Amino acid sequence: MVCSLGVALMTTMIAVACVFSDDSTTLVVIVGPELKDCVGAGPMKCLEVNGELFYETIEGFDFEEGFIYRLEIERYNAWPHDEEPPQDASMYGYRLIEVMSKTSSR
């Protein structure tokens, strides 16, 4: 396993990544306390992850408004046998590994 540590501090946001040989990456992310308006294929609500809109879902994660989460997630190739995903799909899928903390934002 080759592990690279990238730490970005933007207010209280931390990102850590480890790259594994099977094209998956483990990330530690901060999820904000409320869903944000965003536009994908149409108007929708997005998570705020590390201060940016996150248009994807995180498999196994049950978001509850009013809490700030620190999560360990896996980012994996959602289309391992295709050269490119469909135009309206992300190249990656995300799944929850662990809820590291859940803190009330109030």
Image (tube, rainbow, N blue to C red):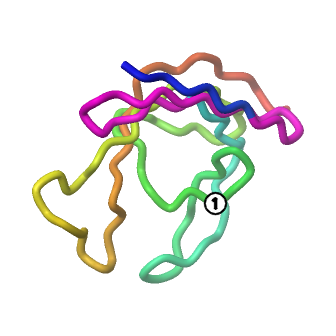
Taking 47 as reference, is 7 left or right?
right
Q: Which portion, as a residue range, is magenta?
A: 8-27
Q: Could you tell me what secondary structure mostly forms the magenta stretch?
A: loop
Taking 46 as reference, is 75 left or right?
left
Q: Nearer the viewer, residue 64 or 6?
A: 6
Q: Residue at (56%, 64%) from the top-left corner?
A: 45
In this view, 79 is above or below 31: below
The amino acid marked with disc number 1 is: Leu
- Quick one: which residue is furthest to the left in this view? 81
Image quadrant containing the C terminus:
top right
Q: Nearer the viewer, residue 103 or 74?
A: 74
Q: Residue at (66%, 32%) from the top-left corner?
A: 6
**Residue 20: x, y in percent?**
35, 28
In this view, 50 is above or below 53: above
Q: Quadrant of residue 41?
A: bottom left
Q: Residue at (39%, 40%) from the top-left corner?
A: 75
**Residue 15: x, y in percent?**
65, 33
Instruction: Residue under label 1, please give it.
Output: 53
Q: Residue at (70%, 43%) from the top-left corner?
A: 32
In this view, 34 is above or below 102: below
- Residue 83 covered by magenta stretch: no
How many residues crowd mark 1 within 10 Å: few (<14), some (14–19), many (20+)? some
- Which SS class for mark 1? strand
**Residue 39: x, y in percent?**
55, 78
